[in-house]
Image (cartoon, rainbow, N blue to C red):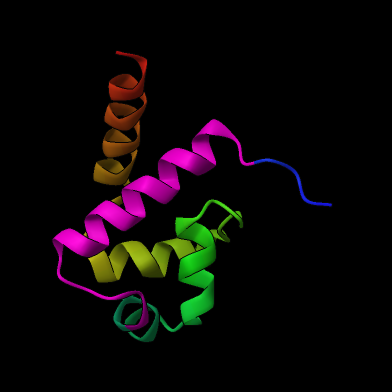
Amino acid sequence: MSRPPTPLQRRLARLLREVRTARGLSQEALADRAKVHRTYVGLLERAEREPRLSNLARLLAVLGLSWEEFGRLLDVSATDRRR
């Protein structure tokens, strides 16, 4: 039996989906460019999997996000959810 997703996993899932769609990428296109499986992207976007750091780095590179910007967007996402 799997554990429920953490608030951070849910924010990460929402952020990945929002940025991916804003960039006009399908899950498959993002996965292909980041050299991960399409189902992995889907699992991340549903908060069903915790990302490996190396995979997250590749996904962020494809999405054109720096670690700093990614962290800021996660913080903004957390702030927005509290309002």
Q: Estimate the x, y position of residue 76 in percent, counting from the top left.
A: 27, 28
Q: Which residues are magenta?
A: 5-28
Q: Estimate the x, y position of residue 77 in percent, counting from the top left.
A: 31, 31
Q: Estimate the x, y position of residue 62 in percent, counting from the top left.
A: 27, 71
Q: Indicate left or right for 27 with 9 as reference.
A: left
User: Of all residues shown, which one is farthest toward the top?
Assistant: 83
Q: Nearer the viewer, residue 27 or 62?
A: 27
Q: What is the count of numbered marks? A: 0
Q: Nearer the viewer, residue 33 or 48?
A: 48
The C terminus lies in quadrant:
top left
| Quarter holding residue 35 | bottom left
Residue in the picture at 41% in, 63% down: 57
Q: Is residue 41 above or below residue 7?
A: below
| Quarter holding residue 24 | bottom left
Q: Is residue 15 above or below residue 11?
A: below
Residue in the picture at 60% in, 35% down: 6
Q: Indicate left or right for 50 with 4 as reference.
A: left
| Quarter holding residue 63 | bottom left
Q: Is residue 50 magenta?
A: no
Q: Indicate left or right for 49 with 9 as reference.
A: right
Q: Is residue 20 magenta?
A: yes
Residue in the picture at 42% in, 39% down: 11
- Most common secondary structure along the magenta stretch: helix
User: Of all residues shown, which one is farthest toward the right?
Assistant: 1
Residue in the picture at 50% in, 59% down: 44
Q: Estimate the x, y position of residue 46 in percent, counting from the top left.
A: 50, 55
